[in-house]
Image (cartoon, rainbow, N blue to C red):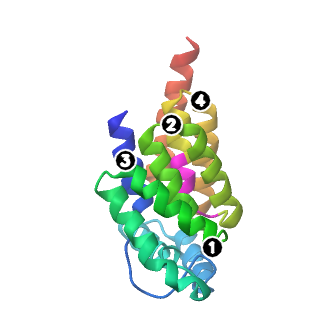
């Protein structure tokens, strides 16, 4: 279980850029097109990091919340999950359209083993940003951890729509299919 918590934290914490951006920036469309077209894993990772940098920053009308959000990220990274939940919740209360606060709180709930709360926050993240590959990865990991392999595969298939040439996703789907098959035996 600890392994999954570390993996999902790494996936969802992402790149910590200081560029002024958020999940609504117009540059995201170009980046997602590049992500869809790339078949180079290094390039895919670089594009993902650029996307994370946009998602990380609060919208201009909520920039005053950035220090609180940053404290939540630091709390999550240093293992202070309860503090992170509190800080992300405060950001969500003040800026409910900021998808990344929902995503970070979902990650924190996952680390705490509260999958139900994590799923609720992932759902909200995906409502606000349907292309959120971090949230989709988290969704897949929750379903895998709870042995809901078919649902994990569905989440991975959504990821594959965003990154159709990412061989790591295709391999993960194959591993999940093997697990699903073995669980039926």
Residues tagged 2 and 4 counted as in contact (Cβ below 8 A): no
Disc 4 element: loop
Magenta region includes residue 135:
yes
Q: Viewed as shown, does residue 109 lie left or right of 154?
A: left
Q: Which residue is mark 4?
A: 148
Residue 100 percent across, percent down from the top left = 54, 66
In the rendered image, the quadrant that contains the C terminus is top right
Q: Would you name the residue on which mark 1 appears?
A: 95
On the image, the x and y values in percent for residue 178 come to 50, 27
Please, is residue 113 above or below residue 130 in the view?
above
Question: Mark 2 and mark 4: span between their CA atoms?
Answer: 15 Å
Q: What residue is shown at x 46% (from left), y 70% (from top)?
A: 69
Q: Residue at x 41, y 64 (%)?
A: 72
Which of discs 1 and 4 lies nearer the camera? The answer is 1
The numbered disc on residue 174 is 2
Q: How far is disc 3 from disc 1 in space, using C-alphas?
A: 27 Å
Which of the pair 71/10 is nearer the observer?
71
Cβ–Cβ under 8 Å for marks 3 and 1: no
Q: Are marks 1 and 4 in contact (CB under 8 Å)?
A: no
Magenta range is 131-138
Furthest residue to the right?
A: 127
């Amino acid at each position: 279980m600890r392994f999954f918590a570390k993996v999902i934290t790494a996936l969802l914490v992402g790149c910590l850029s200081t560029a002024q951006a958020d999940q609504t920036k117009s540059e995201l469309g170009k980046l997602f097109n590049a992500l869809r077209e790339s078949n180079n894993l290094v390039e895919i990772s670089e594009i993902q990091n650029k996307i994370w940098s946009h998602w990380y920053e609060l919208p201009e009308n909520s920039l005053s919340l950035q220090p609180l959000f940053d404290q939540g990220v630091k709390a999550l990274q240093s293992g202070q999950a309860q503090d992170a939940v509190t800080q992300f919740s405060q950001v969500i209360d003040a800026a409910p359209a900021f998808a990344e606060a929902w995503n970070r709180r979902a990650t924190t709930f996952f680390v705490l083993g509260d999958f139900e709360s994590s799923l609720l926050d992932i759902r909200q993240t995906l409502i606000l940003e349907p292309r959120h590959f971090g949230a989709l990865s988290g969704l897949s990991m929750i379903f895998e951890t709870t042995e809901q392999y078919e649902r994990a595969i569905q989440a991975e298939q959504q990821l594959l729509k965003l990154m159709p040439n990412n061989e790591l996703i295709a391999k993960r789907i194959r591993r999940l299919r093997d697990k699903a098959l073995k669980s039926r035996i």
